[in-house]
Amino acid sequence: MMYLEERIWFPVSGYENEYLITTDGKIKSLHKRKYQEEIVQKIDRGGYVTVTLSRNGISKTKWVHRLVALNFIPNLLNKPEVNHLNGNTKDNRMENLEWVTHRENILHAYEIGLFMNKKRRNINQLRLFD
């Protein structure tokens, strides 16, 4: 017999009374019309998972990986970007995300083969100031 692990839901930072989120990026609405209904997630042109959240009649599209990071991953060094460790932009589990600088994000993409520069710039050029 197989048991499914039950998800734990937490309030979304900035939307505490409107939405709940899990560590793997699932989001539920707390609005009356769609109470406890999971929000439909879409893929943007860059391949990132997004959701549309609304508050006070204003809707905003948010990247799910950033919502997960903002809610569950401390950003003690105030780094601006969120990196997918395995390179899969659809894998928004907390364990697969980390806060990085833009430079660290690009370097990681080179290292795992996601980013190929047309000029084939040497990866060591990116490490000059490490």
Image (cartoon, rainbow, N blue to C red):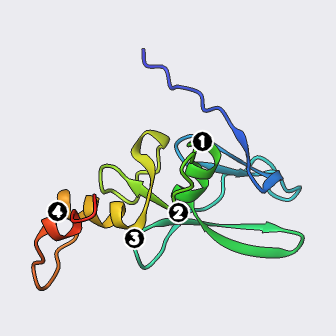
Q: In the picture shown, does residue 26 fall above or below 63? A: above
Give the label on residue 47, or none.
Answer: 3
Q: Earlier in the sequence, mark 2 or mark 4?
A: 2
Q: Earlier in the sequence, mark 3 or mark 4?
A: 3
Marks 3 and 4, how far apart at CA:
16 Å
Amino acid at the residue labelled 3: Gly
Dot 1 lies on which element?
helix
Q: Which residue in the structure is indicated by mark 4?
A: 113
Asked if marks 3 and 4 touch (Cβ < 8 Å), the reply is: no
Who's the residue at 85% across and 59% down the image?
A: 33
Dot 3 lies on which element?
loop
- Is 45 on the left or on the right of 55, as rendered? left
Amino acid at the residue labelled 4: Gly
- Is 20 on the left or on the right of 113, as rendered? right
Q: Which residue in the structure is indicated by mark 2?
A: 80
Residue sitting at the far top: 1
| Mark 1 crowdedness (10 Å alpha carbons): few <14, some 14-19, many ≥20 | some
Q: Which residue in the structure is indicated by mark 1?
A: 72
Marks 3 and 2, how far apart at CA:
19 Å
- Is 52 on the left or on the right of 90, as rendered? right
Marks 4 and 1, how far apart at CA:
27 Å
| Mark 4 crowdedness (10 Å alpha carbons): few <14, some 14-19, many ≥20 | few
Q: Could you tell me residue 6's position as x and y percent?
A: 59, 27
Marks 2 and 4, how far apart at CA:
22 Å
Marks counted in the figure total 4
| Mark 3 crowdedness (10 Å alpha carbons): few <14, some 14-19, many ≥20 | few
Give the label on residue 96, or none.
Answer: none
Asked if marks 3 and 1 touch (Cβ < 8 Å), the reply is: no
Dot 2 lies on which element?
loop
Amino acid at the residue labelled 1: Phe
